[in-house]
Every structure is written in C-alpha cells, then in structure tokens.
C-alpha cells in the first residue's frame, strides 16, 4: 500500500512501473500459422445443437411459469381484509401437517 498515505489519499504511481514502460508482445492468429487449426474452426462452425424432448418441454414450462405473477395480489388482499375484519383463522394442525410433509419430501 505504498501508493496510499495515512489519510487514505492515493498518490501517483511510479513512472518506471507505468503500463507504457512494459514491453508489449503480440500473438499471431493461430489459424494463419497452423492450417489444421483453421480446418477445425471451420468444422466447428457447422456444428448444430438439438434439444431433447425433455429439454424442449422444460423450456416450454419455463415460459409458462414466467407468465404467472410471483404474487397473487387478489389472495393477498383477501387475507388482509379477513385479518382486518378479525375473521382470519390460523389452523395450526394444517400448518404442522404441511411442514412435516415438506420435511419428509425433502428426505430429512
């Protein structure tokens, strides 16, 4: 941290370490120097990708899920209204059963 003083101010770097003082090298195009590499490149350009039926179905399902909103605003508003009215009931047995079913499904 030689370029930072005690007040956390950055000082200019050393001139002998500037990027312009470093030697530069160029890498030639490997296909020009190596005809085999050029042939492999041409072969790769003709490759094709095909999806299996399952992959196509997955893409379709993802598209369908993207259309469903993350929040069901109508249900949220209905629950808010029932809480405000004092008519919302918590069914602890149902919550416990669903939690236990989830734990079992997850294999815990």
Image: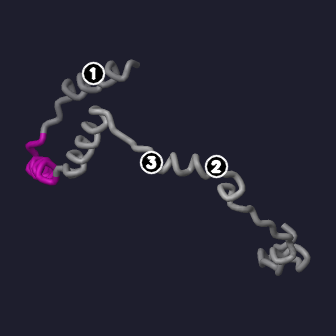
- Between 23 and 46, the residue placed more toward the observer is 46
Mark 2 or mark 1: name the one nearer the start of the chain.
2
Please give the residue where the numbered disc 2 appears in the rendered image. 37
- Distance from disc 1 to disc 3, alpha carbons, whole Å, reads 50 Å
**81 is within the stretch colored magenta:** yes
Between circles 2 and 1, the one closer to the viewer is 2
48 left or right, relative to 98: right
Looking at the picture, how far across and down is residue 83, in whole percent?
A: 14, 48
Between circles 1 and 3, the one closer to the viewer is 3
What is the chief secondary structure element of the magenta stretch?
helix
Above or below, comparing residue 49 to residue 95 in the picture: below
Mark 2 or mark 3: name the one nearer the start of the chain.
2
Looking at the picture, how far across and down is residue 99, in whole percent?
A: 29, 26
85 left or right, relative to 3: left
Magenta segment range?
Answer: 73-88
* Image marks 1 and 3: residues in contact by CB distance under 8 Å: no
């Amino acid at each position: 941290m030689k370029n930072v003083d005690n007040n956390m101010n950055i000082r200019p770097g050393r001139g002998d370490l500037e990027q312009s003082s470093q030697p530069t090298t160029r890498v030639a195009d490997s296909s020009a120097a190596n005809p085999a590499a050029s042939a492999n490149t041409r072969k790769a350009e003709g490759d094709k990708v095909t999806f299996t039926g399952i992959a196509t179905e997955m893409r379709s399902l993802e598209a369908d899920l993207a259309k469903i909103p993350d929040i069901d605003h109508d249900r949220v508003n209905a629950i808010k209204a029932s809480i405000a009215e004092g008519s919302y009931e918590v069914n602890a047995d149902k919550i416990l059963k669903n939690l236990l079913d989830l734990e079992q499904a997850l294999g815990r």
